[in-house]
């Protein structure tokens, strides 16, 4: 009697990145970065133990994304990169780490590089996965996790901001502000301090805003103030405004 041998599908996460981050947060809350037996980590994720299909699949997914590591046989630990992500001081660093998690699985990195200009249809991706050795059922699961992960991160390039197809209202529009001028080099008052008017008051930056310094000739500096998050449509509008300003300067030049 011939035994049917099931072909094993290639390695790929079984859950999307957003769910994986939620899961690893539970392990971090319990153990921080300390290594723990695999069974304990599985229990921290909400499973009875590591010796069942669901738990094994979840643990493997967290490792594929680089959220868990195996410091020694039989033990798992949350990675330092997750802690960096959790406590990232600004959205740009969080974004960079999210992209690194997304591109950690080899399959994801290859697909993102191949479809750099944008993902094709589900039917096209499903065919691609089957051609790579996935059985149809596994291809369907891998496709769902991949597309949801890409949508969660918003893209695949560390140089691009997170993309959101439904940007909020016009509140918090981007602006370019010149840094306050250096204090005058004239006489200083009797107290040894320059006059108060020498230092114009610079408005405090609102919460949810990020400032990017831009170096100019002569030791000057400008600040690009952008809201968080910064959408693709915002970027196009900001570029158009800068181009308009440059055009006006050229027209006014003698």
Image (cartoon, rainbow, N blue to C red):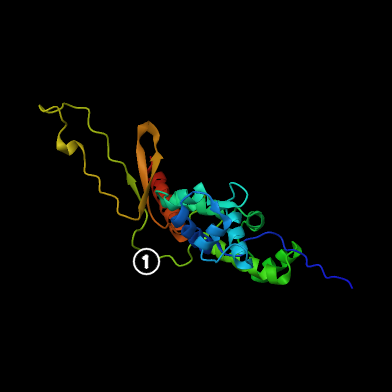
Residue nearer the viewer, 71 or 145: 71
Report whether residue 146 is seen. Answer: no
The location of residue 161, given as percent across then percent down, is 48, 54
Residue nearer the viewer, 238 or 204: 204
Relative height, residue 136 to residue 112 (above, below): below
Report whether residue 196 is seen. Answer: yes
Residue nearer the viewer, 179 or 18: 18
- Toward the right, the furthest residue is 1
The residue where tag 1 is placed is: 169
The location of residue 205, given as percent across then percent down, is 29, 50
Side (left or right) of 127 relative to 231? right
- Quadrant of the frame with the N terminus: bottom right
Residue 120, quarter of picture: bottom right
Relative height, residue 23 to residue 88 (above, below): below
The location of residue 10, given as percent across then percent down, is 71, 60
The location of residue 47, given as percent across then percent down, is 54, 66
- Quadrant of the frame with the C terminus: top left
- Toward the left, the furthest residue is 190
Look at the numbered disc 1 and give the secondary structure of its residue: loop
Side (left or right) of 108 relative to 204? right
Residue nearer the viewer, 55 or 240: 55
Instruction: Report the residue at 52% width, 62% height from top.
Output: 43
Residue 213, quarter of picture: top left
Crowding at dot 1, Cα within 10 Å, few <14 / some 14-19 / many 20+, comes out as few
């Amino acid at each position: 009697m011939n035994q049917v041998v099931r072909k094993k599908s290639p390695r790929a996460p079984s859950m999307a990145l957003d769910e994986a981050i939620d899961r690893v947060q539970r392990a971090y809350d319990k153990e921080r970065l300390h290594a723990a037996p695999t069974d304990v980590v599985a229990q921290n994720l909400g499973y009875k133990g590591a010796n069942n299909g669901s738990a094994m699949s979840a643990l493997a997914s967290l490792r594929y994304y680089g959220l868990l590591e195996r410091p020694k046989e039989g033990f798992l630990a949350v990675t330092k990169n997750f802690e960096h992500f959790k406590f990232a001081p600004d959205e740009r660093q969080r974004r960079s780490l999210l992209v690194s998690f997304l591109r950690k699985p080899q399959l994801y990195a290859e697909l993102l590089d191949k479809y750099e200009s944008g993902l094709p249809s589900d039917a096209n991706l499903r065919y691609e996965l089957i051609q790579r050795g996935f059985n149809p059922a596994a291809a369907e699961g891998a496709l769902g996790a991949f597309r949801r992960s890409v949508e969660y991160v918003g893209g695949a390039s560390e140089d691009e901001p997170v993309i959101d197809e439904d940007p909020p209202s016009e509140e918090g529009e981007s602006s370019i502000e010149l840094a306050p001028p250096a204090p005058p080099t004239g006489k200083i008052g009797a107290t040894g301090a320059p006059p108060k008017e020498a230092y114009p008051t610079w408005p405090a930056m609102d919460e949810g805003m990020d400032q990017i310094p831009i170096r100019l000739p002569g030791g000057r500096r400008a600040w690009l103030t952008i809201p968080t998050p910064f959408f693709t449509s915002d970027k196009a509008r900001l570029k158009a405004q800068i181009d308009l300003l440059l055009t006006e300067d050229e027209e006014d030049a003698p």
